[in-house]
Image: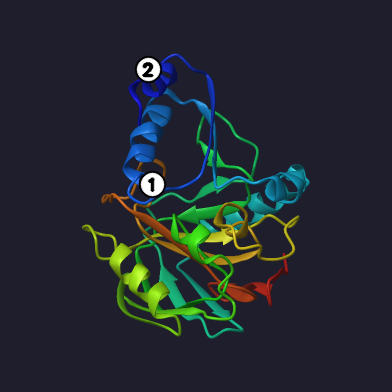
């Protein structure tokens, strides 16, 4: 991250990061957010922002998104496990450490936690994840702009004890990029984020992670899990989200979502 930007953050109360992702630049963003977290700056993170997102996800009723996010947060905080399945074939179970925090980023940004805009998710660093996640929506970081909406060629990822154990995709180039990304550093293959999207103003996948990860559903990310916020005891230098469509979700035995629609 350029030194003048880091110096300006040391004097700022509010900041906005609006940029397009490039291969290998994620560590510079982490360098920036560490200052933001230390100084408790009200920060909007808008990586891959577009005019389309400004006209769609940014126009949600964020009071309603926040109200829903609070309900999801209350359930998640006491959850022993969360089960998620999707029409594309996802079937996974996550377990949680009660000492690790759940974080709400609902588009209303305070000094407590910086957040993406558009907002709308409740996330944590999971204790354990097992099963299969089928990403038939979009991939994160620079793979998002490269591949867009991957509904026609979904990525199937097998996970055991929070680590990738296998992956398959009809597109060899996409699979090669995914495997290279998730093997480039320590913990790059580890589930660092487990998140429930809560932006009820978003109706469909557009092929852009910044907005698509907020769609009502379940997404995960491999690598850095923002331990500064969740309190997790491990870190990473990469972060790759994967998003699928049309989830059913159970918090313990309570079903909170059916086919991508909240039931609470």
The mark total stands at 2
Please determine whether, in this image, residue 48 is positioned above or below residue 187: above
Left or right of residue 246: residue 31? left
Mark 1 in CB contact with mark 2 (< 8 angstroms)? no
- Where residue 155 appears, as percent x and y from the top left, is 46, 78
Tell me if mark 2 has few (under 14), some (14-19) or many (20+) residues whose alpha carbon lies within 10 angstroms of its own: few
> For residue 46, which quarter of the picture?
top right
Up the image or down, 163 lies above or below 24; here it is below
Q: Is residue 21 above or below residue 186?
A: above
Residue 132, visible in the rendered structure:
no
Q: Is residue 38 visible?
A: yes
Q: Quadrant of the N terminus?
A: top left
Secondary structure beneath disc 2?
A: helix
Q: Earlier in the sequence, mark 1 or mark 2?
A: 2
Q: Nearer the viewer, residue 103 or 247?
A: 247
Camera-side residue of 67 and 149: 149
Residue 258 drawn at (x, y percent): 69, 76
Q: Which residue is mark 2?
A: 7
Q: Quadrant of the C terminus?
A: bottom right
| Residue occupying image coordinates x 68% and y 72% | 260
Q: Picture quarter containing residue 174?
A: bottom left
Locate residue 175, reporting x and y percent.
38, 76
Counting from the top left corner in percent of width and height, residue 18 is at: 55, 37
Q: Quadrant of residue 253?
A: bottom right
Is 235 situated left or right of 240 in this image?
A: left
Write down the residue under mark 1.
226
Looking at the image, which residue is at 41% across and 23% down?
5
The residue nearer to you, when weighing 142 against 203, is 142
Disc 1 packing (10 Å; few <14; some 14–19; many ≥20): many
Residue at image position (74%, 63%) is: 203
Q: Provide the secondary structure element on which disc 1 rests.
A: loop
């Amino acid at each position: 991250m350029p030194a003048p930007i880091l110096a300006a953050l040391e004097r700022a109360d509010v900041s906005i990061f609006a940029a397009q992702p490039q291969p290998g630049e994620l560590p510079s963003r982490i360098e920036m957010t560490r200052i933001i977290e230390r100084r408790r700056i009200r920060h909007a993170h808008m990586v891959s922002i577009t005019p389309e997102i400004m006209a769609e996800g940014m126009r949600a009723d964020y009071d309603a998104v926040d109200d829903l996010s609070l309900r999801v947060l209350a359930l998640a905080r006491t959850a022993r496990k969360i089960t998620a399945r999707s029409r594309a074939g996802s079937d996974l179970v996550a377990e949680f450490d009660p000492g690790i925090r759940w974080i709400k980023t609902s588009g209303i940004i305070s000094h407590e936690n910086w957040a993406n805009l558009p907002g709308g998710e409740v996330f944590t660093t999971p204790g354990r994840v097992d099963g299969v996640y089928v990403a038939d929506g979009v991939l994160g970081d620079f793979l998002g702009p490269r591949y867009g909406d991957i509904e026609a060629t979904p990525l199937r990822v097998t996970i055991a004890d929070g680590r990738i154990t296998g992956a398959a995709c009809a597109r060899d180039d996409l699979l090669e990029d995914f495997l290279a990304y998730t093997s480039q550093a320590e913990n790059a293959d580890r589930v660092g984020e487990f998140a429930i999207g809560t932006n009820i103003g978003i109706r469909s996948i557009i092929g852009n992670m910044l907005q698509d990860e907020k769609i009502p559903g379940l997404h995960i990310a491999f690598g850095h899990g923002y331990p500064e916020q969740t309190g997790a005891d491990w870190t990473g230098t990469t972060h790759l989200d994967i998003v699928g469509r049309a989830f059913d979700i159970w918090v313990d035995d309570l079903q909170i979502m059916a086919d991508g629609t909240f039931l609470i």
